[in-house]
Image (cartoon, rainbow, N blue to C red):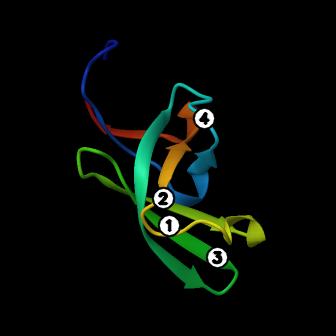
Amino acid sequence: MKKGDEILFSIRPENVQFYESKATPFTVSTTLREIIYAGAIIKFICETPSGQRLIVQASGDRFSAVKEGDEMIIGWEAKHAIVLSA
């Protein structure tokens, strides 16, 4: 595998985070499409410009101001990505 190769990978939703800016190399701009409240856990369904949907799982009150349609930057640490195919 070399830089620029297309890969398929997986990341658990709890390992994806929201960022204020593109703080790490592993971030992507998305649009928040759906918010699902499940007790203390909140699931955010985000969509990339290419139509790929990603799930971010979080807890706490700090997300009370976000709403569907908001632009969100999400990201992860490289160690949490599991390569499925290269």
Q: Residue at x 47, y 49 (%)?
A: 11
Measured as percent of width and height from the top left, residue 64 is found at 68, 72
Measured as percent of width and height from the top left, residue 12 is found at 50, 56
Q: Please, what secondary structure does the residue beneath circle 4 have?
A: loop
Q: Are marks 3 and 4 in contact (CB under 8 Å)?
A: no
Q: Please, what secondary structure does the residue beneath circle 1 have?
A: strand
In primary-sequence order, the first of circles 3 and 4 is 4
Q: Which mark is residue 70?
A: 2
Q: Across the whole image, how many numbered discs are drawn on residues?
A: 4
Q: Is residue 41 left or right of residue 43?
A: right
Q: Work out how far the residue at label 1 is from the one at label 3, CA to CA, in angstroms.
A: 10 Å
Figure quadrant of residue 6: top left
The type of residue carrying mark 4 is Ser
Q: Which mark is residue 21?
A: 4
Q: Which residue is mark 3?
A: 41
Q: Are marks 2 and 3 in contact (CB under 8 Å)?
A: no
Q: Please, what secondary structure does the residue beneath circle 2 have?
A: loop
The mark lying in front, picked from 1 and 3, is: 1
In primary-sequence order, the first of circles 2 and 3 is 3
Q: Work out how far the residue at label 2 is from the one at label 4, CA to CA, in angstroms.
A: 14 Å
The type of residue carrying mark 2 is Asp
The type of residue carrying mark 1 is Phe
Q: Are marks 1 and 2 in contact (CB under 8 Å)?
A: no
73 or 53: nearer the viewer:
73
Q: Please, what secondary structure does the residue beneath circle 3 have?
A: strand
In primary-sequence order, the first of circles 1 and 4 is 4
Q: Work out how far the residue at label 3 is from the one at label 4, CA to CA, in angstroms.
A: 24 Å
Figure quadrant of residue 63: bottom right
Q: Quarter holding the N terminus?
A: top left
